[in-house]
Image (cartoon, rainbow, N blue to C red):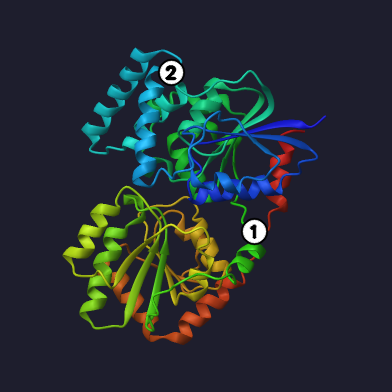
Amino acid sequence: MKKKLLFVINTLSRAGAEVALLEILQKLDEREFEIFLYVVTGQGELVGGLPDHVRLLNPVFCADSVLTGKGRRALVKKVCQSFVKNGRIIFKIRYVMKNLVTMMKEKRLRADKLFWRVLSDGADRFELCFDLAVAWIEGGSAYYVADHVNARKKAAFIHIDYESAGYTRAMDQDCFGEFENIFAVSEETKNHFLQVYPEYAAKLEVFHNIIDQERICLKALEKGGFSDGYGGFRVLTVGRLTGQKGFDIAIEAMKLLKEKGYAIRWYVLGEGEQKKALLRKIQGLHLEKDFLLLGQTENPYPYYAQADLYVHATRYEGKSIAVQEAQTLGCAVLASDCNGNREQIRDGEDGILCELNPRVIAEKIEELYLDEEKRKMLGEEAGKKKITYEEQLHLFQSLLE
């Protein structure tokens, strides 16, 4: 008999953890596993990329990204419905108010983290019993698998610097005690999780993201990419428009480069809640033609291939899929010296690490703009990195033995 395997994720919007999930769903053998997927928010534009053999359990699904205006409105509606669905309304309200007060006291308001428990408790329930249930990401999916899924074994994945992302033990309500295995996507992610949960060291392992380098290289050859006819130096960043990704600092760095008169244009692929604020900042610094928010695209890989430099100036990371994609396509990469990025880049060998500061970022971009040979060397070294997934798949399949 096939083993019943359930994956749970918060959304199916285009982001690193979601892309990594699609990769592992493609790689798992449908002859061995009966694979199910449940999405806590019930929405995301990547739903069309699910393999045919994966059964989506959501009775209703919205294909709008939670990073767009329409998608956010749908998410707000979902949160409101979740307060009522499955009862325990008073408990849900008390949970939100208690954690909101704590966030306000610590001046770390993270609304997206605040409502994962409500969404989990208001999510659909199923009578199915699974051989393995996997919470693919922290937050709502971890709460849901821990509290509301019937499975012989349970595993959780951590994709982010846990403390910096704003999660706390009070929010989690010790949900990780329900998991036999916990996986972090990098050594740094593992170490930061242990700062919050040292008692789970024995069941915490590293499980690196799976990406299909061959497919990425083929898709980079497809039609697409830049269409503005610009003949100067192109800088690219791919990521959600959130505070974590540091686009406010990137815009200020672009202003410094513009003041020096360099023929440089910076492009960003992604959507997010900070888009309006970032556009105001761009307009305020008169960078409308120099720092371009292009939105999301189904195939970002031709942009990587056509860019002169990839910049990843984030405040913190788990392990960036975007950096791995850029390296796969032989891009010279400049990244902030922060958690996650340090593990992916050997400074001065296959990329550059620098302080998250507008002046320093501008100086490093200027240096690479003027030194084509160095860019070429960094890109060639980055392109030599080979990512295999056999070990990860074996580790994953061993959970079912």
- Residue at 46%, 54% (x, y): give it: 340
- Position of 227 with respect to 207 (left or right) is left
The quarter holding residue 278 reads bottom left
- Position of 277 with respect to 124 (left or right) is left
- Residue at 24%, 83% (x, y): give it: 261
Disc 2, SS:
loop
Q: Quadrant of the C terminus?
A: top right
Dot 1 amino acid type: Asp
CA separation in Å, label 1 and label 2: 39 Å
Disc 1, SS:
loop
Question: Label 1: which residue?
Answer: 212
Residue 360 in the image: x percent, y percent?
Answer: 29, 70
Mark 1 or 2, nearer chain start: 2
Question: Label 2: which residue?
Answer: 85
* Residue in front for this viewpoint, 323 or 112: 112
Q: Does residue 110 lie above or below 206 as drawn?
A: above
- Position of 281 with respect to 131 (left or right) is left
The quarter holding residue 75 reads top left
Dot 2 amino acid type: Lys
Contact between labelled residues 2 and 1, with CB atoms less than 8 Å apart:
no
Look at the image and tell me whether residue 120 can be seen: yes
Residue 350 in the image: x percent, y percent?
Answer: 52, 72
